């Protein structure tokens, strides 16, 4: 029986390959070999600038020849079962959105109307937080909670002025 080593990927103790003279760190399992190659690529990419530039240029050329739209179109043509399953899932997502839209209120707080919505009075302004129901609020508007402290404010307004 030959020398043994512990695989860096799977952790098993295995007999080393006699054709590899020194430094074997990965066993022959496909997953471990894949991990070895990935580690080599990662190290090479990090430490070899020429390799990194060459690989980047190669990737750019490949992306230029193979557009994402064409790839997706070929994939859908080759996998009709995926298309059907995705349509069903999208239909379910759309149904969820309809339920969500019906349950939430879209609040636009800076809209002007001709009606007077607030009666004259003294009000306390407190910041409001978004609740757990997920109300959609226009973000550039200041949200405040108005609580009537006193309905007759004529005497207070005279004191202020």
Image (cartoon, rainbow, N blue to C red):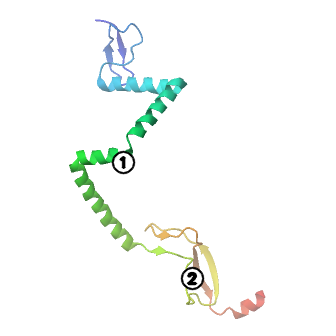
Expressed as whole percent of the image width and height from the top left, the position of residue 11 reads 36, 23
| N-terminal-most mark, 2 or 1 | 1
| Quadrant position of residue 59 | top left
User: Relative to 96, does residue 31 appear above or below in the rendering?
Assistant: above
* In contact (CB < 8 Å): disc 2 and disc 1: no
Quarter of the picture containing the N terminus is top left
* 45 shown above or below 142: above
User: In the rendered view, does 155 fall on the left or right side of 110?
Assistant: right
In the rendered image, residue 114, in percent from the top left (x then y), is placed at: 56, 89
Of residues 57 and 131, the one nearer the viewer is 57
Q: Nearer the viewer, mark 2 or mark 1?
A: 1
Q: Which mark is residue 31?
A: none
Residue 26 percent location from the top left of the image:
36, 19
Element class at badge 2: loop
> Quick one: SS at disc 1?
helix
Residue at (72, 93) in percent of width and height: 155
In this figure, which residue is indicated by the disc labeled 1? 69
Real-space CA distance between mark 2 and mark 1, rounded to the nearest whole angstrom:
44 Å
Question: Left or right: where does residue 136 sit relative to residue 147?
Answer: left
Between 155 and 87, the residue placed more toward the observer is 87
Q: Which residue is depicted at the point 39% across and 23% down?
A: 36
Left or right, 92 with respect to 63, comes to: left
Say which quarter of the image contains residue 5.
top left
Viewer-nearest residue: 105 or 131: 105
Q: Is 116 above or below relative to 141?
A: below
Residue at figure coordinates x 53%, y 24% from the top left: 50
Q: Which mark is residue 112?
A: 2
- Residue 8 percent coordinates (x, y): 39, 22
Query: Which residue is painted at 21% across and 50% down in the image?
Result: 81
Q: Residue furthest front?
A: 65
């Amino acid at each position: 029986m030959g020398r043994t080593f512990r695989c860096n990927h799977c952790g098993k103790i295995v007999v080393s390959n006699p054709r590899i003279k020194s430094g074997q760190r990965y066993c022959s399992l496909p997953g471990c070999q894949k991990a070895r190659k990935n580690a080599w690529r990662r190290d090479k990419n990090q430490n070899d600038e020429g390799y990194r530039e060459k690989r980047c240029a190669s990737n750019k050329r490949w992306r230029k020849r193979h557009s994402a739209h064409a790839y997706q179109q070929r994939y859908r043509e080759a996998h009709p079962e995926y298309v059907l399953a995705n349509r069903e899932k999208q239909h379910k997502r759309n149904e969820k959105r309809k339920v969500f839209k019906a349950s939430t209120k879209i609040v636009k707080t800076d809209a002007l109307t001709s009606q007077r919505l607030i009666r004259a009075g003294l009000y306390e302004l407190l910041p409001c937080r978004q609740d757990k129901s997920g109300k959609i609020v226009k973000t550039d508007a200041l949200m405040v909670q108005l609580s009537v402290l006193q309905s007759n404010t004529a005497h207070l307004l005279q004191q202020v002025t």
